[in-house]
Amino acid sequence: MRRSVRWLVYTVTALVLLFSYRLSPGAPAGDAGTYRGRVVEITTGSVQVVVAVRAGRITSVAVPVFPDSNGTSRQVSERALPALKRQTLAVQSADVDTVSGATFTSDGYRASLQSALDVAGARRQDR
């Protein structure tokens, strides 16, 4: 009998912890929505990230503003942005690694993404 009670308490505790745990510290929770990050100025141009969130998960990432003023900036953006988007969807936060050769773009992306996630969090708390 004691073993059954102990097992039940451990199981309930584990389930409560499991369902209350946020998968990553930067991931927003709450309702669905699209959130636009601030435009971040970097040495090669500007970066802005837009995220879609549903059921507390980042479901898509768009970068409508990115450095493309010259051929080199376009090449860096074309290489770096898909990698940054993939990482964002994988880690569900703004804690993404810098893409080699695209330090400024990566930094601007992270800053804009974090501001979008901050807006998502603020809107969630306002409800």
Image: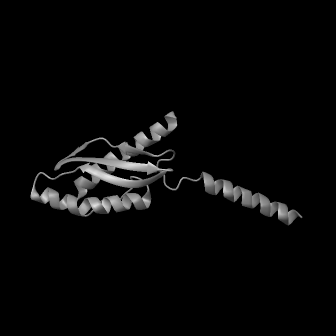
Which of the 4 image quadrants contains residue 17?
Answer: bottom right
Locate residue 27, reporting x and y percent: 46, 51
Relative to 94, 28 lies left or right: right
Residue lying at 29% horizontally and 61% vertically, measured from the top left: 82
Q: Is residue 97 visible?
A: no
The image's colour scheme reads: one colour
Between 68 and 54, the one nearer to me in the picture: 54
**Quarter of the image with the N terminus in it:** bottom right
Q: Nearer the viewer, residue 85 or 6?
A: 85
Residue drawn at 25 percent across, 49 percent down: 64
Expressed as whole percent of the image width and height from the top left, the position of residue 80 reads: 25, 61
Tell me if I can see residue 34 in this picture. yes
4 sits left or right of 71 in the view: right
Outermost right residue? 1
Q: Can you name the residue that lies furthest to the top here?
A: 126
Residue at image position (23%, 53%) is 104
Q: Position of residue 22 (x, y in %)?
A: 54, 52
Task: Judge whether 117 appears above or below 85 on screen.
Answer: above
Question: Which residue is at 38% across, 55% downward?
Answer: 60
